Image (cartoon, helix red, strand yellow):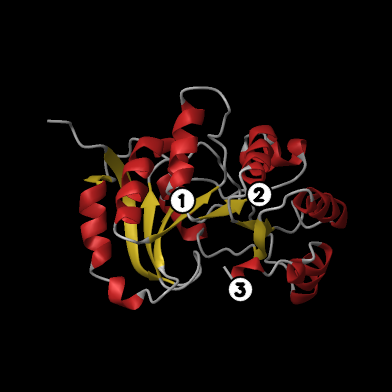
Amino acid sequence: MTTPVMGRIHSTESFGTVDGPGVRFIVFAQGCRMRCQFCHNPDTWKINDPKASLRTADDVLEEAAKYKAYWGEKGGITVSGGEPLLQVDFLIDLFKKAKAQGIHTTLDTCGKPFTREEPFFSKFEELMKYTDLLLFDIKHIDNDAHRKLTTQTNDNILEMAKYLSEINKPVWIRHVLVPQRSDYDEFLIRLDSFIKTLKNVDKVEILPYHTMGKYKWDELGLKYPLEGIEPPGQERVKNAKALLHVDDYTGYLTR
């Protein structure tokens, strides 16, 4: 008898409405190697946090199924985090079983674990067979600025975006607009140019930076790195949407 694949799960949310099409059951995976200055879930960083629950795919699907009546035609399951790709074996098991039940699957990722090297790449290819959509977070287009903002480089993240384009896997690009970090026209124009090279982008979303997760940093005894930086005003959000041509990406309306 095979041992079931266990996932380290931080929490779940029954009625997500901003994490993919329709109403979603959200699974927040535990663990992330990025240390984004604007992170609103720093409590998901520690991979082996004893507070996280060890759960099987069957267990998660059983919980999700309770809410299936609310999903309609477009809803389903979204796995977010943390960074779900750190638990790729669990993701494969979960999404494969979800697709067998006709459930729409969405992966919310920053792409940092991606590599074309083995054994990860073969597993990622397998996962893509059962993934309907990716919410792909590009934190910063500039590598040096990305490292300052997240402590990590973005080379392999952009490589993952290119690979997803190669296999024509639908993605929604998400970009957090942070004053004094990513909210500069030069960077937004470069990001726009990069996105235009991809053929699989159904939607581009600007997510204005907010401070709603700051209390978690305080609870964890962590120094909040964006202290004093206010969320971007409406004009800067409007400017970013214009520079990234968000209105040009409408594939999500018909898919």
Q: In this rendered view, identify the residue nearer to me: 121 or 9.
A: 121
CA–CA distance between discs 3 and 1?
A: 18 Å
* Crowd band around label 3 with a 10 angstrom C-alpha radius: few (<14), some (14–19), many (20+): few
Q: Amino acid at mark 1?
A: Thr
Q: In this rendered view, identify the residue nearer to me: 72 or 228.
A: 72
Q: Nearer the viewer, mark 2 or mark 1?
A: 1
Q: Amino acid at mark 3?
A: Leu
Disc number for residue 168: none
Place of residue 90 in the rendered image (x, y in percent of width and height, measured from the top left): 33, 40
Disc number for residue 131: 1
**Position of residue 163 in the picture relative to residue 18 (left or right):** right
Asked if the residue at tag 3 contacts the one at tag 2, i.e. Cβ–Cβ closer than 8 Å, the answer is no
Asked if the residue at tag 1 contacts the one at tag 2, i.e. Cβ–Cβ closer than 8 Å, the answer is no
Residue 83 visible: no
- Residue at image position (75%, 41%) is 145
Residue 28 visible: yes
Asked if 214 appears above or below 163 in the picture, the reply is: below
Please report whichever mark, 2 or 3, sits nearer to the chain's N-terminal start: 2
Q: How many marks?
A: 3
**Is label 1 in a helix, a strand or a loop?**
loop
Q: Quadrant of the C terminus?
A: bottom right
**Is label 3 in a helix, a strand or a loop?**
helix
Q: Which residue has dot 3 on it?
A: 253
| Residue extending farthest top | 118
Q: Quadrant of residue 4?
A: top left
Q: Which residue has dot 2 on it?
A: 138
CA–CA distance between discs 2 and 1?
A: 19 Å
